[in-house]
Image: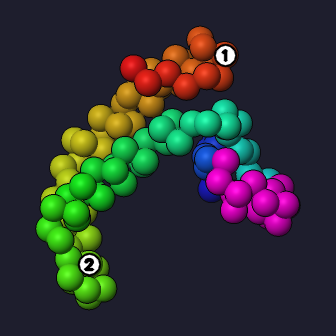
């Protein structure tokens, strides 16, 4: 990762494990501080939710079908949806700061 980049992850135990923290430190990666109960702060989580709904509607019957459906549904998600999630990220962060790290669900 280049200069100016900040690594973002939630507080899932695998992300906060001692080994993970040590690896990030050794790589000199700047890590975004993350309020504890806040999975909705990561823009990709909304995209995963959308993908999960799309996949469930298709009802894949086996692992091979699941892989195919995942790829097809991922390809159908418009770039504008991703752009909108990123665009709204700043607003979300401002809200979190204003609420002193408590998650805003607006």
First in sequence, mark 2 or 1: give its number.
2
Q: Residues within 10 Å of mark 2 (few under 14, many from 20)?
A: some
Say whether residue 68 is visible.
Answer: no
Instruction: Name the image quarter holding the N terminus.
Output: bottom right
Residue 24, image x, y percentages: 77, 58
Residue 21: assigned label: none
Q: Is residue 1 above or below residue 100?
A: below
The verdict on residue 45 being magenta is: no
Residue on which disc 2 sits: 66
Q: Is residue 11 left or right of residue 106?
A: right
Mostly what secondary structure, the magenta segment?
helix
Residue range corresponding to the magenta coloring: 11-25
- Location of residue 22 by image quarter: bottom right
Q: Is residue 4 left or right of residue 81?
A: right
Residue on which disc 1 sits: 100
The verdict on residue 12 being magenta is: yes
What is the secondary structure assignment of the residue under circle 1? loop
Residue shown at 20% from the left, 54% from the top = 77
- Location of residue 96 by image quarter: top right
CA separation, marks 2 and 1? Answer: 41 Å
Residue 91, image x, y percentages: 44, 21
């Amino acid at each position: 990762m280049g200069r100016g980049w900040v690594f973002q992850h939630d507080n899932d135990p695998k992300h906060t494990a001692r080994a993970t923290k040590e690896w990030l430190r050794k790589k000199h990666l700047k890590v975004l501080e993350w309020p504890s109960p806040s999975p909705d702060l990561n823009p990709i989580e909304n995209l995963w939710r959308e993908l999960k709904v799309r996949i469930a509607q298709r009802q894949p019957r086996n692992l091979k079908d699941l892989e195919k459906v995942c790829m097809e549904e991922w390809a159908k998600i418009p770039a504008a949806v991703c752009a909108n999630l990123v665009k709204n990220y700043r607003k979300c962060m401002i809200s979190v700061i204003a609420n002193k790290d408590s998650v805003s669900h607006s």
